[in-house]
Image (cartoon, rainbow, N blue to C red):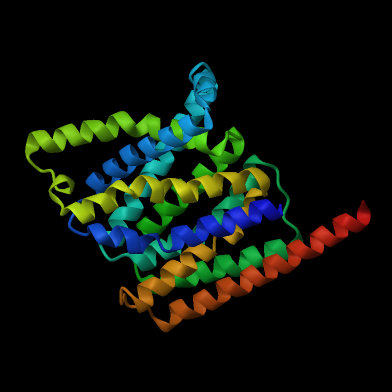
Amino acid sequence: MNNGLVNAIIAYIMWGVLPLYWKLFNDVPAGEILSHRVVWSFVFMGILVAVQRRWGDMKRIAASRSLLLSLTASGLLIAANWLIFIWAVNNDHVVETSLGYYLNPLLNVLLAVVFLREKPSRGQWLAIAIAGAAVLIIAIDYGRFPWISISLAATFGLYGLAKKKIGQDASVGLLSETAVVLPVAIGYWIYLAAMGKTTAWTLPVPTFIELLLSGVVTALPLLFFARAAARMSLSTLGFVQYIGPTIMLLLSIFMFKESVSPVLLIGFALIWTALVVYAAASVRGTKLAAKAS
């Protein structure tokens, strides 16, 4: 559990500061950034798996139809999440991406109850209710249907569930997921070249090198997340996730100068209250379980 918690905290801090990285490529369309992200993530993970000498595991996955289908689903989900996130950040919707990842833990709890038969305590349900009210207040104050937020929450929530159900090794699993969408990414490169719409390949050399590093930037937090998902309950993992959107919200206020209303700040305070309540309930549950044993 402790090892899982450390991995989760590292992953969510990395994801929290990720908008700073994607802002480097404001002049590149989101779809083209995504295609590079997929290709260079595949290259990086391929090198890592080769160093680990895990190609035997890849052969085992290729021979299992059920594993291939599951990893295809998780690969498509994470690719959709990446595309929405990149587009939102580079079109000045960082506040809405933050809201999406505040929504995601609530969805994680629902998915955990429905699919994994996890049973939150009364204190944890209270925390969920407080957080749900906060997100509702934020959404109403936002003034329109937050499709970016909902899409991000849904794709990443279902991705987390898929990772939990698959139980695959982090590096091998991520290589398999990027392999699923690799043909689409390369096909998109060919299409852009044929139409004369390539942007990334014309970037200054230092900026293009930074884009090449998108494989590392993408893979590292996902590796930490996969390890955390294997060691923690999905609902607890979801609440640790509040670290990421909190960092994004602070970046949107202080660095990107997006408009933030007082109501949004009230919702932000309520969400952290919910986090404290949830943590207290979880600690109490752990102590009661220890006494019972």
- The answer to whether residue 4 is above or below residue 24 is above
> Toward the viewer: 211 or 160?
211
Taking 121 as reference, is 268 above or below it? below
Q: Does residue 104 appear left or right of residue 91 in this picture?
A: right
Q: Where is residue 124 in the image (x, y as percent from the top left)?
A: 70, 62
Please identify the residue farthest to the bottom as the structure is shown.
Answer: 262
- Is 195 situated left or right of 73 in this image? left
Residue at 18%, 52% (x, y): give it.
205
| Residue that sits furthest to the right in the current view | 292
Please tell me how many numbered marks the rendered image carries.
0
The residue furthest front is 51
- Left or right of 259 in this view: 238: right
Query: How far from the left and from the top, in percent, is residue 259?
Result: 32, 78
Q: Can residue 193 be seen in this view?
A: yes
Name the foreground residue: 183 vs 85: 183
Q: Quadrant of residue 140?
A: bottom left
- Of residue 252 and residue 42, the one placed in the foreground of this image is 42
The residue shown at (51%, 48%) is 157
What's the residue at 46%, 69% (across, down)?
A: 247
Residue at position x 52%, y 55% in the image: 11
Position in image of residue 51 (x %, y %)? 48, 33
Q: Is residue 236 visible?
A: no
Q: Position of residue 229 (x, y in %)?
A: 60, 46
On screen, residue 139 above or below 79: below
In the image, farthest residue toward the left: 196
